[in-house]
Image: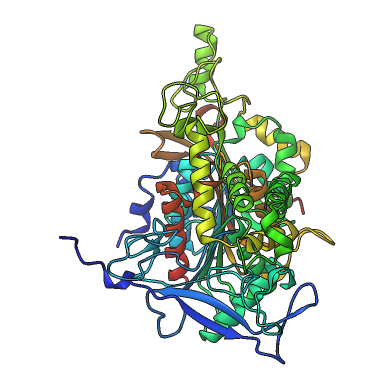
Amino acid sequence: MESKKDTSLLVEKKFFTFAEPPNEMILDSGAKLGPITLAYETLGELNEDKSNAVLVLHACSGDSHVAGFYSEEDKRPGWWESMVGPGKPVDTNRYFVICSNILGSCMGSTGPSSTNPKTGRPFGFDFPMVTIKDMVQAQKHLIDHLGIKKIMSMLGGSVGGMQVLRWCVDYPEMVRSAIPIATTTRHSAQAIAFNEVARQAIMSDPNWRGGNYYDGKGPDHGLAVARMIGHVTYLSDDSMRSKFGRRLQNRSTLSFDFNGDFEVESYLRYQGTKFVARFDANSLLYITKASDYFDLERGDGTQLVNDKLADIRFLVISFTSDWLYPTYQSRAIVSALKKNGSDVSFCEIDAKWGHDAFLMPNKQRDKLISGFLDRISHEN
Amino acid sequence: MKTENELLDNTRFDLQIIASWIKPNSRILDLGCGNGDLLDYLRRQKHVHGTGIELSEDKVATCIGRGLTVLQGDFRDEVHDYPDLSFDYIILSQTLQQVMDPEKLIPELLRVGKRVIVSFPNFGHWLIRLQILFTGHAPVTDQLPYEWYNTPNIRVITISDFKRFLRKTGVRLAREIAINTHHHDREGHIIKYFNNLRATYGIMMLEHPG
């Protein structure tokens, strides 16, 4: 008989709606958007003085389901269950964990697949361009709604790490500590290039139809190809060699056709198909564009050099085989923060899993984050 | 509760001396901080705000895991980012002899910190002198246990030479102690006379002139 799940791990997807007209949220682009709904989940208990909140920021295609289960029968835990839970580095016995789905996504928060109140139909490409700054501004509304004045710590990898940095720049007074992982102050040309290929894959699918496909078949093939490209950038030469090598999929000889011979082809096709079932193509377009636009170094030097950030404690983490956000980009973050006199720690973890390493169980990563959070919680 | 002395019992003797020179609540930068023993001690006993720089990933993870602030990297590159006088003390223990360019490093450290505390193995120790004199071989001692072909210690420093270097570069020597260590450098005593001949390590606190 299956053992009963820890009831503290049962989570519920909740929704918070704000920016009702005429008080719409003003976006980075100047456009107005409202009402806005954010899907979010929480684990653990908020303590009396509301000082134990940990905000987890998810990456590009993630969602609010960071850890736990929706029901006792639910078999699939959240996307970062190696990091968040009772006794895990982000210990839900001690901390109140919040994770919300980003603005522009399709996992419960307002995005291009949501209904446009003006037309009663999905926004499609009428959805305004949203940026990382807008995503963070929306999250701030949620944190205000929860009555939390200061977040004990916020952490996230990849595009989640961008949100961490954006929080620190835009609302430094609300951040006690921050853990940007496998991230950057701005995309390299290489990162933009891969995103653009992914977008073109979607937009050149005849079923995309200018983004207004919600009444019919969507750009499934384009979206699957976009995801395949994404997956390649999340892995590494090393991890692909050990995961697949040149092994053939369910066959012993070459097929001499194009149905796919290699395991790696089969894996990417599977990932592509799986993604189509859960994600909206327009959301991927908007979110990849938002991550390309993100730039903390635009204008007069980096926005991370700012006295207001001096009181935030930072732990910056990168991974040796991550070629999407290589270590030099994390070092640039560290270098800027040192100029503020910020308390900043940095570790480059030796891992062969490429950019995906931040999601994989890793003892070194766990030691860093649990030790850092423990210290921050005692500095209350 | 451990006493101050017990906490440092397992710490190198030169670090015990250095710790005794640090004023409470000061800002510290420990270059090559290892597993963070000194930083941890200073944090508990002197309530310092400490940062360490360390090359080894494992040691960095150990440090951060025990709640210390540590950056992974080569301190020769990492120090340049800090604004002037970011620290009250910069500690460079038993590393100077491995630095390619001490003539550039020391002034840079004195830009970032008000005071720099250095400790280094004294190449003027009598045992080293005798080894060269009688065996004709490059010396190998407890403090300098390497052969010429694998040693990281590329700079040969004696206490006298270092003091001459300070005079030449106009750096003020605020404090100095010479020590003789034994038992894996965990125990030792302070040398009062003929330091350059009898001490295995020199420890000095450097300041801006004036």
Which residue is farthest right?
Answer: A300
Res A304 seen here:
no
Q: Position of residue A54 (x, y in %)?
A: 48, 70
The front one of A242 and A110 is A110
Going by the image, does B118 lie left or right of B209?
A: left
Which residue is farthest front?
Answer: A216
Place residue A122 in its image quadrant: bottom right
Res B168 seen here:
yes
Residue drawn at (55%, 61%), measured in percent from left and top? A279
Which residue is farthest bottom?
Answer: A22
Q: Position of residue B82 (x, y in %)?
A: 70, 54
The front one of A141 and B39 is A141
Residue drawn at (50%, 58%), measured in percent from left and top? A277
The front one of B58 and A287 is A287
Residue drawn at (74%, 35%), measured in percent from left and top? B103
Q: Position of residue A250 (x, y in %)?
A: 40, 31
Q: Position of residue B197 (x, y in %)?
A: 54, 27
How is this picture coloured? rainbow
Place residue A301 in its image quadrant: bottom right
The front one of B193 and A82 is A82
Work out which quarter of the rendered image holds the N terminus of chain A and state it: bottom left
Give the answer, above or below, for where A114 lies relative to A262: below
Give the answer, above or below, for where A33 lies relative to A58: below
Q: How many marks?
A: 0
